[in-house]
Image (cartoon, rainbow, N blue to C red):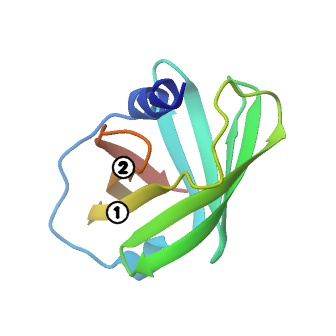
């Protein structure tokens, strides 16, 4: 089931080319949008210590504890379903790692990995 969830994350996004300009601090906090043909739009609201994701198409709202490892890398832990139901349940030891690898204007390309799957995804997120 964890692999299914991780693969679903992979299908959320498409990747594009970016200019080589990396100022991760400006992308650490704010409101972001992630769009996918299969799952619609996910709105991500990130504060210094939390990330909340809302997807109206899937009728799902989740939150994570967020820990910054460095200026461009953070971990998502302790997933909680706030609204709706999810087929995926994270274990207390599960961690999703996100690394900002490219930034162009308000778009960023991130690499997503986890400690529960060998899958690696590069996805595009826009700051809104």
Rendered-image quadrant of the N terminus: top right
Is 28 left, or right, of 112 in this rendering? Answer: right
From what the image shows, is residue 60 above or below residue 39? below
* Residue 73 position in % (x across, y down): 38, 70
Q: Residue at x 76, y 27 (%)?
A: 59
The picture quadrant where one finds residue 119 is top left
Q: Residue at x 79, y 27 (%)?
A: 85
Extreme residue toward the right, this view = 83
* Residue 99 position in % (x across, y down): 34, 63
Extreme residue toward the top, this view = 38
Q: Residue at x 37, y 50 (%)?
A: 112
Residue toward you, 111 or 92:
92
The label on residue 113 is 2
The picture quadrant where one finds residue 14 is top left
Q: Are marks 2 and 1 in contact (CB under 8 Å)?
A: yes
Residue underneath mark 1:
99
Is 108 left, or right, of 75 in this rendering? Answer: left
């Amino acid at each position: 089931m964890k692999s299914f969830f991780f693969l679903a994350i992979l299908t959320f996004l498409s990747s594009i080319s970016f200019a080589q300009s990396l100022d991760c601090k400006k992308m650490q906090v704010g409101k972001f949008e992630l769009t996918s043909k299969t799952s619609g739009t996910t709105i991500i609201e990130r504060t210094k210590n939390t990330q909340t994701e809302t997807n109206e198409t899937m009728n799902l709202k989740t939150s994570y504890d967020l820990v910054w490892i460095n200026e461009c890398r953070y971990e998502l832990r302790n997933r909680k379903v706030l609204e709706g139901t999810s087929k995926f349940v994270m274990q207390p030891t599960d961690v999703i790692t996100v690394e900002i690898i490219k930034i162009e204007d308000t778009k960023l390309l991130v690499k997503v990995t986890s400690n529960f799957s060998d899958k690696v995804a590069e996805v595009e997120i826009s700051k809104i």
